[in-house]
Image (cartoon, rainbow, N blue to C red):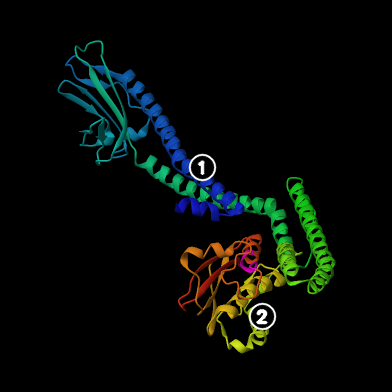
Amino acid sequence: MPSQALRKRLSLKSRLLLAATLWLSAMILAAGFGIPKLVKDYLISDVTSQLNLAMDEIIANLEMDANGEIRLTRPLSDPRFSQPYSGLYWVATHENLTLRSRSLWDKTITVKKKPLRKQLFGAQKEPLIYTEQSVFLPDSKSPINIVVGIDEAPINQTLDELTEQLWIILGLLFTGVLVLIGLQVSWSLYPLTIMKHELTALKAGKQNELSREYPKEVSPLVADLNALIFHYQELLERARHHAGNLSHALKTPLAVLRNEIQSLPVEERKKLEEPIAQIQSHIDYHLGRARVAGSVNILSVSTPVSERIDAISMAFDKVYVERGITLINEVDSEVEVAVDPTDLDEMIGNLIENGYKWAESIIRIHSKADNNTVTLFIEDDGAGIPEDKLQHVIQRGVRLDETTPGTGLGLNIVSEMAHSYRGSIQLSNSQLGGLCVSLNLVKV
């Protein structure tokens, strides 16, 4: 899935920064929307408290005369009630009588009912924050309904200004904290950056181990990696040394045996030639397996493919000059693979030699690269191999034509060498009419 592929491509630093950004964004958004709401609730609560005080003052000074009319015994303490259109109003209603503040002038408080509540509007049709109460006076037989309201526009204006300033502060806080987190993440992951540079130098062959000091969380990994590289190099050197010794130790005795059996009668010579050939085949196979071990500098190996193909083809042009084979090398000169030059020569040499043996006139070598691998295609215009035997010929010692010189180990050794370098080979029929060998190797 795309999200899984994205998660795999994200580096540790990107993951930490992404998580911090998401978390910090959530906190900033919560603060940006939550704080204004809390402030608005506080302001409305404070204004409502002031309106309740004014309500108490109105009730305390309200009386009914002998004619049943209501009036205030004295002016209210807040002068805004006396200033026309001040935004602070009160209205007292008793039956058909209405007493209102001077601030309403010749207007009154209007009501607009909404689904969940009613909204009151002042003298200039401004929305009001209000409190409402019904009281009975000593001489009244019906309640007096009193409403005290104040224009909510100043509160909204104050809240808008506060919200604007709050978002500026939160934006600066978001940027500052994110920069600080980025610096912290970079500082925390700096040892891994140093390790990356050392691994690059190790891959380039500029050093043989990771030599820097690392934090205690990483140092065990570095120690194990250094030990693994050293152990690998030691084992590889030892294996190649022993393989070379074995080759030299067995070469002379086998040559002596071959010479000696030539003097024997024909029947006895035939009996001995087959076991000696089997011994030679086993020696060739296991010496080839020893060459599969790979490069001493396991991380720094790199070989240009086209250059090696040209060198190998020049040699085979001389060996098979009588066959008149033309090799076409279409591999880009910039293509390099993570294979030891000797091992790459062994693999490509086996495949090209097969082409020289079986091609009619042309061998074509081309490549296809993707993000991590390079596929080399070695094709010829020979007789090819039947479909049912394509995979069979990769097995050890298999030869489809006993008349052509060889041990039958070439394709098997190439397959195992490719596998040791995290590669593979596949056989198919070529568009030229013969065999097409696809050699997949890791790209540098």
- Dot 2, how many residues are within 10 Å of its Cα: few (below 14), some (14-19), or many (20+)? some
Magenta segment boundaries in residue numbering: 408-412
In the picture of the structure, the residue carrying the numbered disc 2 is 312
Q: Amino acid at mark 1?
A: Met
**Position of the C terminus by quadrant:** bottom right
- Dot 1, how many residues are within 10 Å of its Cα: few (below 14), some (14-19), or many (20+)? few
Residue extending furthest toward the left: 96
Q: Amino acid at mark 2?
A: Ile
Which quarter of the picture shows residue 242?
A: bottom right
- Residue at 72% over, 72% down: 342
Q: Is residue 332 visible?
A: no
In the image, is residue 389 above or below residue 320?
above
- Residue at 70% over, 72% down: 341
In the picture of the structure, the residue carrying the numbered disc 1 is 27
Front in this rendered view, residue 341 or 388 = 388
Front in this rendered view, residue 126 or 95 = 126
Labels 1 and 2: the sequence-earlier one: 1
Badge 2 marks a residue whose secondary structure is helix
In the image, is residue 264 above or below residue 360?
above
Q: Is residue 392 magenta?
A: no
Front in this rendered view, residue 119 or 105 = 119
The mark closer to the camera, 1 or 2, is 2
Q: Is residue 262 visible?
A: yes
